[in-house]
Amino acid sequence: MMKKFEVTILGSSAALPTRSRNLPAQVVNYRDRLFLVDCGEGTQMHLKRNRIRMGKIMHIFISHLHGDHFYGLIGLVSTYHLLGRKEALHVYGPEPLEQIIRVQLEASETTLFYPLIFHTTQHTAPEEIFNDGRISVTSFPLLHRVPTTGFLFREIPHPRKLLRDVADRYGIPVGAFDAIRAGNDYVDEEGNCIPNGLLTQESAPVRSYAYCSDTGFYEPLADMVRGCDLLYHEATFMQDMLASAREKQHATAVDAATIARLSGANRLLLGHFSARYEDLQPLLEEAKAVFSQTELAEDNATYEV
C-alpha cells in the first residue's frame, strides 16, 4: 500500500479572495507529516474548516513577498503563541520575511513561547532546503516581479525490497541484507555470485509534487519539475489576456499546460485564478487542449500525489 502523500488546497485565488476562493495556501501531507505552503489571509480558518491539526505543522514555506501569499503568517504565528506552542516552527522564505515578522511581534509586545526559526531561500538556482530522510523539499526560481521560488516535494528513494524467502533459500546471513537492499550482489564464501535481481524487487516508485505560484511562462521550469507526479501551476489568466499576463509576469492556463507537457508531468492542477473569473471551466478547456490530464484546484479539496 502506498504511503499517504496528498495536498489540500486552502486557497486558490489570486490577489483578492472571492466568495468561493480563498487566498493562496495549501497543506502537503506526507505520511501524516504536515507542511504549509504559502499563508494568505484567512489560512487559519481554512485549516480549521478542513480539520487539519495546526499543531502538527512544523515547516512553513513562503514563495514570495506579495501579500496574498504571506499576510496570514503573523496571525498563525500569534495563534501558536496563544495556544502555548512549545515546538520549534521553521519558516522558509525570502530574506526580508524574518524582519517583517519580527517587527510585528515587537510592535505587539509579543515574546513567543516557542522557537521561530527562519531559513532564507535564494531565487537564482534550485536548492535543497529540507530533508528528513523520507522526503526532501527543493526550492527553485520562478519568473515574477519580485524574488519568487517554487517548491518541489520529493520522496527519498526507498531501498530495494528484499525477498526474504529467496535469501533464506541461499543461506544468506542477515548481516548482508543491508548491502543487498542497497543494490549489491551477494558473493558467498565459495565465490559464487547471486545477482541482486534474484534477491530483491523494485520498491514503490518515488513520487513528487511541485508548487509553482506565482510565475510567468518560464520554459526552464520544465527541467526543474521534470517528471513530477502532480504539478500545481498558476493560471491567473485566460489566453485572451496574454499581454497582461506577460506584463505582470503571471501565467495563462495555456502556459501552465505547456509547462506540464514539456516537463512530462503526470497531472496538472491549475490554481491562482484571477478574481475576475467566476466560471473556471473556460480556463480548464484551454489547458486541456494542450495537456489533457489537467484539473482545476478547488478550495478545501484534497488531491493525491
Image: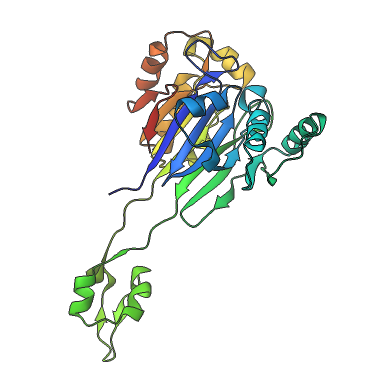
Say whether residue 196 is left or right of residue 32: left
Q: Quadrant of the C terminus?
A: top left
Q: In the rendering, at what x and y percent does residue 62 appear?
A: 62, 35
Q: Is residue 132 above or below residue 211?
A: below
* Residue 7 versus residue 133 in the image, above or below: above
Residue at 42%, 13% (x, y): give it.
Answer: 280
Q: Position of residue 158 (x, y in %)?
A: 38, 58
Please indicate, yes or no, whether residue 85 appears anywhere in the rendered image. Answer: yes
Q: Nearer the viewer, residue 111 or 267?
A: 111
Which picture quadrant has residue 176?
bottom left
Q: Residue 181, located in which quarter of the rendered image?
A: bottom left
The front one of 37 and 78 is: 78
Residue 81 place in picture, x, y as percent: 67, 37
Image point (31%, 53%), residue name: 204
Judge whether 6 appears above or below 158 on screen.
above
Residue 154 vs residue 37, the one in the foreground:
37
Q: Is residue 220 visible?
A: no
Image side of residue 96 versus residue 44, left or right: right
